Image: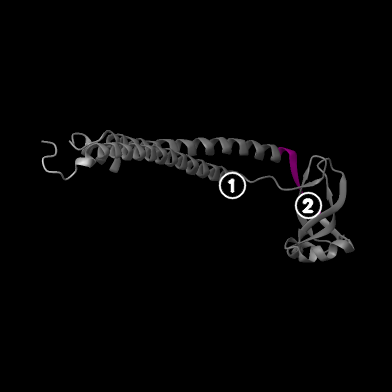
Amino acid sequence: MRAVTGLWRWRHNPLRRTTDLVEAWVALAAVVALCVAVPVAALTAASSARHSLQRAVHAQQQGRAETTARVLRPAPTPPSAAAADEQSAGQRFRRAVVATWTAPDGTPRTGTVTVSRGSGAPGDTFPLWTDREGRPVTAPMADSTARTHAAGVGVMAAALTGLAVETVRRLVMRRLHVRRYAHLDRAWASVGPDWGRTGTGS
């Protein structure tokens, strides 16, 4: 709004300088860029990220299977790692156990996995994700998580685009100010020596 007002104010002003008009046009262009480029960049980046993440989620869902594992016994902890494990924040909530589960091909598997401390007693069951070979893997990314990540990418793209527009505007304004002061210096150099003298300009 200020850019439009500035253009209208300087349109027929006899004191208008070229830099004043350029400054108003630059401000208007920056406002238009912010209103158009920022939303377009955000939507484009978010859409691209969403499609990529959806493909990753689909691939993970196709390559991983959920099964139920049963705890057999606590996993032995090497003496050298015991002190470090006690200080680990993750060890406060999770523990390593030896468990058994069924692979996607129906064969039984046994191995060491980590579970929450509330389900680490022998005989407890817990959900476990495995790959096609029956090896434990992390759970596939949830659709809601993919959408959240895509939205974050869109917000980041919008912020970077807005920052780029503002940076360009500031650089142009800085150049305009340098030219304006240079023009004032030249004008003062031409009239400064006669400033205040009687009959100057007559």
Identify the residue under disc 2.
68
Q: Quadrant of residue 135?
A: top right
Label 1: element kind: helix
Q: Tell me which label, 1 or 2, sits earlier in the chain.
A: 2
Label 2: element kind: strand
Q: Main secondary structure of the magenta part?
A: strand
- Residue 68 position, x and y percent, is 78, 52
| Cα–Cα gap, marks 1 and 2 | 24 Å
Pointer 1 and pointer 2: residues touching (CB < 8 Å)?
A: no
In the image, taking residue 162 as reference, residue 32 lies left or right, namely left
Magenta residue check for 145: no
- Residue 67 position, x and y percent, is 77, 48
Magenta residue check for 64: yes
User: Which residues fall within the magenta stretch?
Assistant: 62-69
Residue 104 numbered tag: none
Question: Given this view, does label 1 or label 2 mark the residue nearer the observer?
Answer: 1
- Residue 23 position, x and y percent, is 32, 37
The structure residue drawn at horizontal position 73% and vertical position 48%, both measured from the top left corner, is 138
The structure residue drawn at horizontal position 21% and vertical position 34%, both measured from the top left corner, is 11
The structure residue drawn at horizontal position 81% and vertical position 42%, both measured from the top left corner, is 104
Identify the residue under disc 1.
144
Amino acid carrying label 2: it is: Thr
Does residue 38 show up?
yes
The structure residue drawn at horizontal position 22% and vertical position 38%, both measured from the top left corner, is 191
Residue 38's place in the image compared with 71, above or below, is: above
Category of crowding for the residue at label 2, using alpha-carbon neighbours closer than 10 angstroms: few (below 14), some (14–19), many (at least 20): few
